[in-house]
Image: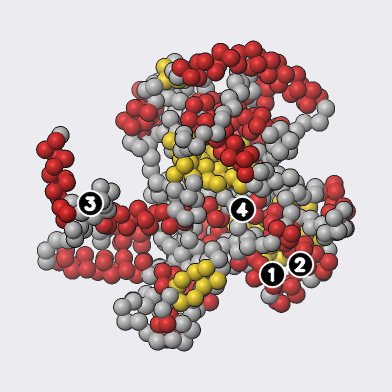
Amino acid sequence: MTDDTTEDEPPSATAADDDGEKKNNHRKNGKRRLSKRERKNLKKQKTSAAAAAANTTTTNKTTTTTSPSTTEQHDSKASQASKSANNKAQPTLEEYHANYIPAPSVKISKENSDSKSLGKWFPKASVTKSQVSYGNDYLAKLAKEKQQQKNESNDKNSATTIKEPKASLVLFYQYVNPTWSNAKVSSFLAYLTNIAQTHRTNIGGRIRVSSEGINATVSAASTADSDVDAEFEAAQTLRHFTKDLQNFDAEAFKDTDFKYVDGLTADRHFKELKLLPVKELVFYGIREGDCATTNATAAAASTAAAAGESDNGKKEVKGGVHLEASEYHEMLKRNDAVVIDVRNHYEAAIGRFDGQMAKEKIEEQEGEGGATYIDPKMRKSTDFTSWLAEEETKQKLEGKTVMMFCTGGIRCERASAYLNSQIGNKVKGVFQLKGGIERYLKEFPDGGFWRGKNFVFDKREAISAGNVNGDGGVIRSGKKEGKKEEEEKMLEWGAECAKCKKPWDRYIGKRKCYTCGVPVLVCNDCMSQSSSSTKKKKKGAAAAASTTNAAAVEDLKSIRCPLCVSEGVTVPAEDVEWTDNGVRGRPRTSSFSEGGGEDNDKKAPADGAPKKSESKAAKSVLKWGGGHAKKKKDQRSWSRRPCQFGAECIRKDCFFYHPERESKSKKET
């Protein structure tokens, strides 16, 4: 997903190869054995399914000859790109929809509720494990067997018989108007849960659902023993899934921009599907009256620019005008425009739209520079309103053509509407990139005016021009061509290790800023120092080396992000009590008030930060996952501490360690 409030911990390796095989044993000849309930439902739906398939074919043919839908247009573009890259035709939408069986509707049952708490932000989340999951060991084994088969073959160009599993992604969001009722939201969540549990069991991902719509990143993986082409199977599953959404609410999803990414390696698949009921898809802390859920297109720019009075007398607020990637590219050449990065600063640190400002581009445009890039330097989306309220910001934007962009487009919806409501009459217009950076990089495979990497909230980690599969996974050793040139570019926009300051643009090791909690760039060498220190201590010289490594770990724990360093922020994030989702805060104790006293129990940051007598707290702090990860960590810690009540403890679910219960359970077994 493209929402900065949905950031989970960076994905780790999935199960080993034997686990992957076990999970796929329930399938025979590519088909899963249906339950008794499913067979009964399928029997009832045979007639309607046949009619639906015939209707789908007729509708698709009609749509193709007249005006293709948004999804079909994007599939056509993806087809052209695939032909040039792989020299093979991309399947049509009709081929993907062949053999489509609609997902059955379900009744809501409180007794059968599958909700599970994922922290205070998501108290009623639903988690469904995908029936298909491939571990790194299993994939490495397949790659090794494939290479061995190639080596044994006389013809090196011949195809191998080893079937390599594939994954696909679909990224999308949809605001609905009018908003859904609570009953419909509950019905939709139950519908999605049923799809994942009984109908399309090879999907995973994260889906945020509220009364205002949906924001989703969904993956699908091919099955190990299917006779169908692996890439086609994964891609088809997602086309069927989006068709299920349209069956649920045809009006809401008729124009949804589904961004499909096919042909990915199988480790890009999510091992579970998380359904997260939320109040707001992207939290900005903005009044509903200052936001829009519908936006104009470039063809309706004149209408969007004119803010009139609605029938009920309220001011009608419009979001930015949606521009296709090619239109956005042309507008970036204008020197009277500014381009606002609506993402967080840690995302902007590894990639941005400032290629139009490069010297070689200015020379191509006969001395005229392109749109001026502006980074609001936000830690989270809620910082946008305070940034826009600053006088310096208003001066930069006044009289300019304002362009906005984000990862996939959803953050621009709220931000552009809010900007229009505040200073819309002082700018020439507000425009946003339709489909976000994800769509732009598909339109411009060479990168266009984009430089660096696009940070994404899925297992790809970050993508760039020519690297759709992303950087996620194990760091590969070895020198790359043009590495020196890449490092110079990284240093130019500040992509460097927070500890040793060498060029680096990958977020690994789940390192967070000591003072605000955002991800921090730490290079592999510095991370290696940290991991080596966790090994068992040895006597003599080894013990001294271990002590040195332990100090290095402390340095990494108290590392600060570039934003906190430049702002002089020194108060640890854990020592500040935040309210309103981290927008406003106050010191937990008087020791950390502005210019307050010093607390000897806490260690000062290791990168030359001022003393705590000169301490300053961050304007906002990033909280990860609503606190459920910390709760699990605390439970593991408690389980190693003996319970003070011992055998007299009456709590069966006590978190603390009970040796007498452990010995009793061993005797029973």
From the image, tell me which residue sits under label 1: 388
Q: Earlier in the sequence, mark 1 or mark 2?
A: 1
Which residue is drawn at the image coordinates 43% and 30% (left, top)?
Answer: 131
Q: Earlier in the sequence, mark 2 or mark 3?
A: 2
Q: Element under label 3?
A: loop
Amino acid type shown at disc 4: Glu
Q: Position of residue 599 (x, y in %)?
A: 35, 82
Label 3 crowd bin: few (<14), some (14–19), many (20+), radius 10 Å: few
Q: Earlier in the sequence, mark 4 or mark 1?
A: 4
Find residue 63 and report its image quarter: top right
Look at the numbered discs 4 and 3 and tell me whether their residues touch, using CB distance below 8 Å: no
Q: Element under label 2?
A: helix
**Which is in the foreground here, disc 1 or disc 2?**
2
Q: How is the image coloured?
A: secondary structure
Q: Element under label 1?
A: helix
From the image, tell me which residue sits under label 3: 650
Q: Which numbered tag is attached to residue 280?
A: 4
Label 1 crowd bin: few (<14), some (14–19), many (20+), radius 10 Å: some
Which residue is drawn at the image coordinates 60% and 21% (left, top)?
Answer: 101
Amino acid type shown at disc 3: Ile
Q: Earlier in the sequence, mark 2 or mark 4?
A: 4
Residue 49 to residue 571: above or below: above
Side of 519 relative to 144 (left or right):
right
